[in-house]
Image (spheres, grey):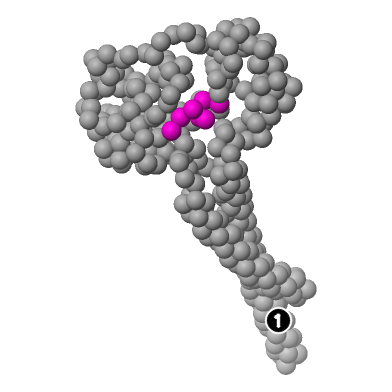
């Protein structure tokens, strides 16, 4: 009897050990499954991050290629820098209707401007008055309506048209109304033979109160510390904008997609630089695509291990 009990206890112990071992193995497999699931999630996050990088570099590449195309158009015809084919078609329509205008419209404004002393301030000026460079100027409301009609004919939507009396003489700005600083203003670096264009830039663009500086630190001093009278805005050479309204100081970074100035006298250097930038962005995107392939292979391997563990469980 005792021998039978001893044998039974031995068998029960053996069964308990088997259950314990099976439970330990199950716990180990579940732990490994959890670890693999965490690794899979991390791997998926990494793939999503790589996808974001690829999209970012491809977007930058496309923006740069658009800049290159615009610059090449500008090489062949300067006016195309200020509205592309639309402005060429508009000018042809204006020419055809010229007798119906009281005064021929002036524009695009950018075609009437040049930079003095080279291209140093081209990007800064673009950030300061770029939104006005595609604009046209007419002398009254009748001409405004006629020019709007011409723009509609050539599908030139959202054309900015400025009404300004062409008979107004060149504005002479008293010295006491200018910013008291040795730094140049946008007005001082522009050359223009058309006094109406310059009047519009002063009256509507405040170019005489937009000051240009070499760098960010100088800009901070001029914009925020020197308390210069008649100062509207400060622009750094790379397009950073600074201004204060009352106690509020504002700094706006340059528009990254606007890395050249349309008033530049020569675009060859900009095209070469953009071409190098485009190659770098393309290479970066391709490198991330290889990284994505590696990450996807790792994810496949984790999937196989997960399926193997599920089979065992």
Front in this rendered view, residue 21 or 97 = 97
Up/down of 158 relative to 167, above or below: below
The spot of residue 227 in percent (x, y) is 23, 23
Kindly tell me whether residue 246 is visible in this rendering: yes
**Image quarter for residue 246?**
top left
Side (left or right) of 71 relative to 170: right
Q: Is residue 123 left or right of residue 296?
A: left
The residue furthest right is: 311
Measured as percent of width and height from the top left, residue 113 is found at: 46, 29
- The one nearer the camera, 218 or 157, is 157
Q: Quadrant of the N terminus?
A: bottom right
Callout 1 secondary element: helix
Q: Magenta segment, which residues? A: 108-114
Query: Is residue 17 placed above or below 313 in the rendered structure?
Result: below
From the viewer's perspective, tell me whether residue 74 is left or right of residue 180. Answer: right
Give the position of the C terminus as an image quadrant: bottom right
Q: Is residue 151 above or below residue 55?
A: above
Residue at 66 percent across and 20 percent down: it is: 94
Residue 111: within the magenta? Answer: yes
Res. 299 in view: no
The residue carrying mark 1 is 18
Quadrant location of residue 51? bottom right
Residue at 78% over, 73% down: 311
Q: Residue 204: percent from the left, percent from the top?
A: 45, 17
Residue 224, given in percent of the width and then of the height, sits at: 27, 28
- Mark 1, Cα crowd under 10 Å, few <14 / some 14-19 / many 20+, is few
Residue 1 is a magenta residue: no
């Amino acid at each position: 009897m005792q021998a039978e009990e001893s044998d039974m206890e031995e068998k029960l112990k053996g069964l308990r050990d088997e259950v314990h071992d099976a439970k330990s193995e199950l716990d180990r497999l579940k732990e490994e499954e959890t670890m693999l699931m965490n690794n899979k999630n991390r791997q998926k996050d990494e793939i999503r991050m790589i996808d974001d990088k690829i999209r970012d570099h491809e977007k930058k590449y496309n923006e740069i290629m658009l800049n290159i195309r615009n610059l090449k158009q500008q090489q062949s015809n300067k006016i195309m820098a200020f509205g592309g084919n639309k402005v060429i078609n508009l000018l042809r329509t204006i020419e055809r209707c010229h007798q119906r205008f009281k005064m021929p419209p002036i524009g695009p404004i950018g075609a009437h401007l040049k930079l003095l002393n080279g291209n140093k301030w081209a990007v800064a000026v673009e950030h300061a008055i770029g939104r006005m460079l595609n604009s046209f100027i007419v002398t009254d409301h009748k001409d405004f309506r006629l020019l709007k009609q011409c723009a509609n004919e050539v599908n030139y939507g959202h054309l900015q048209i400025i009404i300004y009396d062409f008979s107004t003489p060149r504005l002479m700005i008293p010295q006491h109304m200018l910013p008291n600083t040795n730094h140049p203003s946008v007005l001082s670096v522009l050359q223009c033979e058309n006094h109406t264009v310059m009047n519009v830039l002063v009256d509507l663009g405040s170019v005489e109160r937009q000051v240009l500086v070499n760098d960010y630190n100088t800009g901070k001093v001029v914009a925020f510390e020197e308390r210069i009278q008649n100062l509207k805005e400060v622009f750094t050479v790379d397009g950073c904008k600074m201004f204060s309204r009352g106690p509020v100081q504002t700094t706006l970074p340059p528009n990254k997609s606007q890395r050249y100035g349309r008033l530049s006298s020569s675009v060859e250097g900009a095209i070469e630089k953009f071409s190098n930038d485009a190659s770098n962005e393309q290479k970066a995107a391709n490198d991330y695509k290889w990284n994505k392939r590696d990450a996807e292979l790792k994810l496949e391997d984790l999937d196989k291990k997960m399926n193997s563990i599920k089979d065992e469980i």
